[in-house]
């Protein structure tokens, strides 16, 4: 029960942070800082870095998520029986729906400063950051319970590094502002922590 309460507390905290970040996107000084950071990141573009970040950003594409979610459901099925894949599928489906709803709510145009790839829809929050936070979080939740204790920090480190690189890829490619990515992370963490609280609750 203690773990459930901790996850729910994290959910509330992440929702609060998300709202704060969302409000900040309409504040002119934050908008200026957003653009300044984006231009600085874009100024470091190289041919090899572009190839790398285009590969990294593909982990947040539908071509990855649909088969990835199916694979994660199968993994959870053999770990938690029927409730595992049901929770995963509901969590990922809800995340996508919430993401689209939030984009329509904030209605923020995407950056027009030298994007390297086409992108549809609005900018805030970053769908890649949001979906990857939930997906990789669910994967990490499974992995750290399957590996020996001394490898758990390594799993968390690798997952966190990949998640940060995916967020950075959206900035490097000129498809999002920094606050979009932060908003995606916080919204994703809110959904992830609520999902983990649910899984903990049904197992008790």
Image: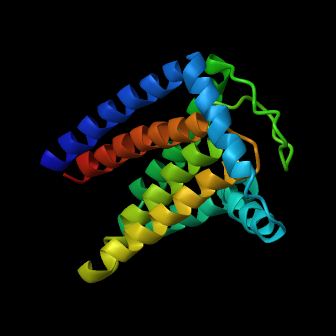
Q: Position of residue 58 (x, y in %)?
A: 73, 60
Residue depicted at 55% across the width and 17% down the height: 27
Q: Nearer the viewer, residue 195 or 116?
A: 116
Nearer to the camera, 103 or 110: 110
- Left or right of 69? Residue 196 is left
Q: Is residue 39 above or below residue 35?
A: below
Q: Residue at x 27, y 43 (%)?
A: 7
**Colouring:** rainbow
Q: Residue furthest left?
A: 2
Query: Is residue 1 at all visible to an observer of this figure?
Result: no
Q: Is residue 125 left or right of residue 153?
A: right
x%, y% of residue 190?
40, 38
Q: Whole-percent x and y of residue 123?
A: 69, 32
Q: Quadrant of residue 38?
A: top right
Depth check: 46 or 106 in front? 46
Residue 119 in the figure: left or right of residue 41:
right
How many callouts does the rendering have? 0
Quadrant for residue 101, please give it. Answer: top right
Image x and y of residue 147, in percent = 33, 80
Q: Residue visible at 48% across and 27% down?
A: 21
| Looking at the image, residue 158 lies above or below residue 200 | below
Residue 135 lies left or right of residue 56; in this view the side is left
Residue 45 visible from this viewpoint = yes
Residue at (38%, 76%) from the top-left corner? 154
């Amino acid at each position: 029960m203690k773990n459930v309460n901790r996850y729910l507390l994290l959910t509330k905290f992440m929702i609060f942070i998300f709202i704060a970040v969302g409000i900040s996107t309409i504040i002119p000084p934050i908008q200026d800082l957003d653009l300044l950071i984006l231009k600085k990141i874009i100024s470091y573009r190289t041919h090899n870095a572009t190839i790398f970040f285009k590969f990294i950003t593909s982990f947040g594409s539908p071509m990855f998520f649909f088969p990835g979610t199916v694979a994660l459901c199968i993994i959870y099925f053999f770990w938690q029986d029927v409730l595992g894949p049901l929770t995963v599928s509901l969590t990922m489906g809800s995340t996508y729906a919430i993401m689209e709803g939030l984009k329509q709510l904030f209605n923020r145009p995407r950056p027009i400063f030298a994007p390297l790839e086409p992108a549809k829809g609005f900018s805030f929050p970053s769908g890649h950051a949001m979906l990857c936070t939930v997906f990789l979080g669910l994967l990490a939740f499974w992995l750290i319970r399957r590996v020996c204790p001394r490898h758990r920090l390594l799993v968390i480190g690798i997952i966190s590094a990949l998640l940060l690189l995916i967020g950075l890829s959206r900035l490097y490619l000129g498809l999002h502002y920094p606050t979009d990515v932060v908003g995606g992370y916080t919204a994703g963490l809110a959904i992830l922590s609520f999902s983990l609280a649910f899984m903990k609750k049904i197992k008790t």
